[in-house]
Amino acid sequence: MNKNEVKNMDEQDIQKHQKHYSDNKLWEKIRRVAKKAGVSVIYAALLLYYTLQKPEVPNKVRATIIGALGYFILPIDLIPDAFVGIGYVDDIAILVTAIYQATGYIDEGVKSKARKKVEVWFGEDVDTSEIDAKIK
């Protein structure tokens, strides 16, 4: 599967990865790959994680978020994470697709929590504008 096919995945394609999601697995993956994956990937994952904590998020959106985070956690994915420079292309594409589905539930509180956590790992001068621009 190439980059364009990943971008064209729909909710059902993403949701099939739900079985790989758990809070503990997500935090372990983030701790392990944060520096290698980069700010955008980690920020996108955290936006989804904190959105998932909101009780008003409907089940369909919740399922998409869990599927995207499950894909991120999955140790074997379409483009292996070990490939420097391109290893997280598929992960960010899946996470951004889920962000589009969850946009209406990603508020300033969610952004603030995600940004603060990213600043702990990457420093206060992080740039989250690339992902923030996708949230309308």
Image: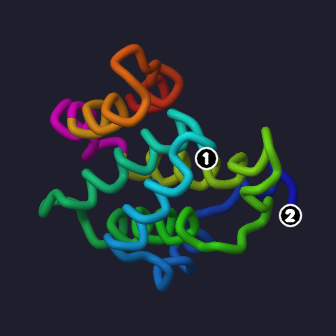
* Residue 72 image point, x, y percent: 56, 62
* Residue 24 image point, x, y percent: 34, 72
Report the side of 16 relative to 113 (left or right): right
In front here: 36 or 108?
Answer: 36
Tell me the crowding category of disc 2: few under 14, some 14 to 19, or many 20 or more residues within 10 angstroms, Cα based: few
Q: Amino acid at mark 2?
A: Met
The verdict on residue 80 being magenta is no
- Which residue occupies the extreme top position in the image? 125
Most frequent secondary structure within the magenta stretch? helix
Tell me the crowding category of disc 1: few under 14, some 14 to 19, or many 20 or more residues within 10 angstroms, Cα based: many
Q: Amino acid at mark 1?
A: Ile
- Which span is picked out in magenta? 103-112
The image shows residue 123, relative to residue 65, as above or below, that is above
Which residue is rendered at x = 39% and y = 36% of the image? 121
Element assignment for label 2? loop
The image shows residue 11, relative to residue 128, as above or below, that is below
Report the side of 53 relative to 16 (left or right): left
* Residue 91 image point, x, y percent: 63, 54
Element assignment for label 1? helix
Report which residue position mark 2 lands on: 1
Which residue is rendered at x = 37% and y = 76% of the image? 22
| Viewport quadrant of the N terminus | bottom right
* Residue 55 image point, x, y percent: 12, 63
Which label is found at residue 92? Answer: 1
**Earlier residue among tags 2 and 1:** 2
Which residue is rendered at x = 56% and y = 73% of the image? 12
Residue 118 location, quadrant? top left
Which residue is rendered at x = 38% and y = 29% of the image? 136
